[in-house]
Image: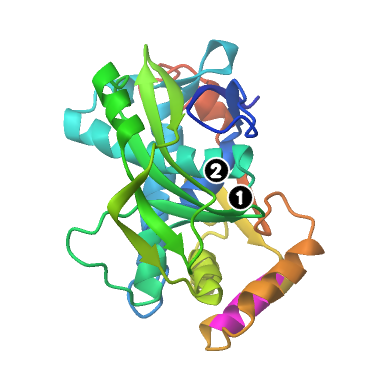
Amino acid sequence: MDSFHIPLGMVDFHSSIRTPQFLKVTAADLGHALFVTGRAPGDQSRHGLNSVYEYLHRASIVPAYLRQGPDNRMLRTSLALSLDKSEKSVLSYFLGQAMTGIFCTSVLDTDWPLHIDRYAASSRIIFQKGNLRPDLFARSDKGWVVAEAKGRSAKPAKADREEFRKQKRSVASISGVPPWQELVSIAHWHREELKVLAIDPEEDEPESIPLVLDEDRFVLAYYLPFLRWFDYVASEVTRGLVVEPTSIAVTVSLDEQLLERIREAEDGNTIGLASDVRVILDDSVTQYSDGSAFEVDWDRQLTRSDYEFDPFGELL
């Protein structure tokens, strides 16, 4: 299957930032983005393997609801179109998170796009009631990137787009340094095709919050779901069940040295984790810059007709 070509609009970004016409997204990219941008913390003491099942729930939207159309467009299946309003909102939310992560990594060259709530959960941070805060933040060589992720079942109205443009920046600083880039990203359906609109808001919110970040704990929070995934796979093998990790055909791998260092960090050795991981990644050749690789077997589902079933429910 060729990559999806998702039309991309960018508003008010600095001229030094490249503005591609499309986001080119493979099925594996979707699997990876849905994995790393989720809120489930992967914290053994809080949720354990439940975070894996939560990922499987999110990943299943790809074969269930998405299809590759003409010109490599991303379209919805007839099942997706039959969802009620609240169900469509869930689909749009998941895609909004994933597309924001993909935009940050592919256009802004970031590493480790992490949901801020996942970092807060693993670091025991409690935000004050009413605090505005973004969805994702990520590290780049130019500084921190902070992103508000939105998903819509229809094209945002002109008034909504203007409101996004005027939306104030919600993070004043990260460890005393203003973010290099703060943005709003909207994944939306227009004439049954998914499109992405990214907007650079105008200025800071007067009550924008400073984040004091422990980078070692940030890196640990990013990789915790990988640990829970491998725990899940090991438990399936131990119990004599299928070796294939999931019925939705996703296989996740991580650089072996990196995995060993993350397990040490979960056991308490977090000091120097971020710098250790950078050294490992500098020498690692993997599919994604975070040291991971994703294999998905969704090509047939993404390219077939919705009606390729026989009366007994078997794929033709």
Q: Quadrant of residue 193?
A: top left
The residue at 38%/64% (across/down) is 210
The residue at 71%/67% (across/down) is 278
Q: Is residue 263 magenta?
A: yes
Q: Is residue 232 visible?
A: no
From the top left corner, tell me how far across and down residue 34 is, in percent.
47, 47
Circle 2 sits on which residue? 104
Residue lying furthest bottom: 268
Q: Badge 2, how many Cα within 10 Å: few under 14, some, many 20+?
A: many
Circle 1 sits on which residue? 110
Look at the image and give the residue range highlighted in magenta.
258-265
Q: Badge 1, how many Cα within 10 Å: few under 14, some, many 20+?
A: many
- For the residues labelled 1 and 2, the Cα–Cα distance comes to 6 Å
From the top left corner, tell me how far across and down residue 171 is, in percent.
38, 55
Label annotation for residue 149: none
The residue at 64%/52% (across/down) is 142
Q: Are marks 1 and 2 in contact (CB under 8 Å)?
A: yes
Q: Amino acid at mark 2?
A: Cys
Q: Is residue 289 visible?
A: yes
Q: Amino acid at mark 1?
A: Thr
Query: Predominant secondary structure in magenta?
Result: helix
Q: Is residue 272 above or below residue 243?
A: below
Relative to 297, is 287 on the left or the right? right
Q: Is residue 210 magenta?
A: no
From the top left corner, tell me how far across and down residue 214 is, in percent.
50, 75
| Label 2 element class | helix
Q: Relative to the observer, which residue lies in front, 119 or 268?
A: 119
Q: Relative to the observer, which residue lies in front, 207 or 227?
A: 207
Q: Is residue 4 above or below residue 205?
A: above
Q: Relative to the observer, which residue lies in front, 160 or 208?
A: 208
